[in-house]
């Protein structure tokens, strides 16, 4: 299955699903009302994603089993591109399993591990947020994530 929207695209491996939508949070709508723009959020997972979920996967990560992985790609405000937090260039497609830990989770769930990476690609600042269902099997689960990250494409800001 191919996903495409808002300057993002990805090809889902068998058994994966995902969405690319605009940020639907209250803060996003408030900023948009003040002249800001709604920013893209991509969710990719190898388990069924619930309809109601937060940008960082609340509502979904609670449903994860040990073999499941969840990936969120969230775009930030254009003026953040290249700032200190987003200085790294390009979506990280190879991830170091040793960097995954429970402290990186937005919502701590027993047995899970996470990772957050901030970067700029095509003049667009992003956070890559990954949750693994089994902190004891990080190496295998990271390979699943890298498989889907290899297919992600980010179009440059016009």
Image (tube, grey):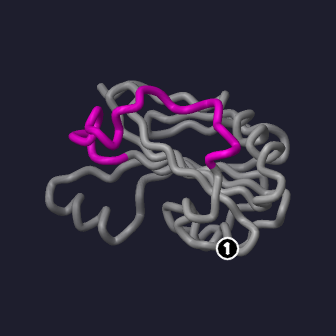
Q: Which residues are magenta?
A: 76-99
Q: Residue furthest left?
A: 34
For mark 1, does the 10 Å Cα neighbourhood hold few (<14), some (14 to 19), or many (20 or more) residues? Answer: some
State left or right for residue 24 relative to residue 18. left
The residue that appears at 52% across and 45% down in the rendered structure is 128
Name the foreground residue: 124 vs 17.
124
Q: Main secondary structure of the magenta part?
A: loop
* Residue 158 percent across, percent down from the top left: 29, 25
Q: Residue furthest front?
A: 98
- Quarter of the image holding residue 152? top right
The residue that appears at 55% across and 28% down in the rendered structure is 153
**Residue 147 on the magenta segment:** no
- Quarter of the image holding residue 7? top left
* Residue 58 percent across, percent down from the top left: 57, 70
Describe the element under mark 1 as helix, strand or loop: loop
* Residue 40 percent across, percent down from the top left: 43, 47
């Amino acid at each position: 299955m191919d996903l495409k929207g808002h300057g993002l695209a990805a090809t889902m491996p068998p058994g994966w699903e995902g969405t690319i939508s605009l940020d639907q949070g209250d803060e996003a709508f408030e900023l948009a009302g003040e002249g800001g723009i709604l920013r893209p959020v991509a969710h990719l997972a190898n388990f069924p994603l619930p309809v109601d979920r937060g940008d960082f996967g609340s509502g979904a990560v609670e449903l994860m089993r040990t073999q499941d992985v969840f990936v969120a790609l969230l775009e930030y405000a254009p003026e953040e591109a290249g700032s200190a937090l987003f200085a790294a260039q390009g979506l990280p497609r190879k991830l170091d399993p040793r960097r995954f830990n429970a402290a990186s989770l937005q919502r701590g769930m027993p047995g899970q591990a996470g990772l957050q990476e901030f970067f700029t690609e095509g003049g667009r600042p992003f956070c890559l947020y990954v949750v693994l269902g089994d902190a004891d099997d990080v190496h295998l689960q990271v390979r699943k994530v890298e498989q889907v990250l290899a297919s992600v494409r980010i179009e440059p800001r016009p």
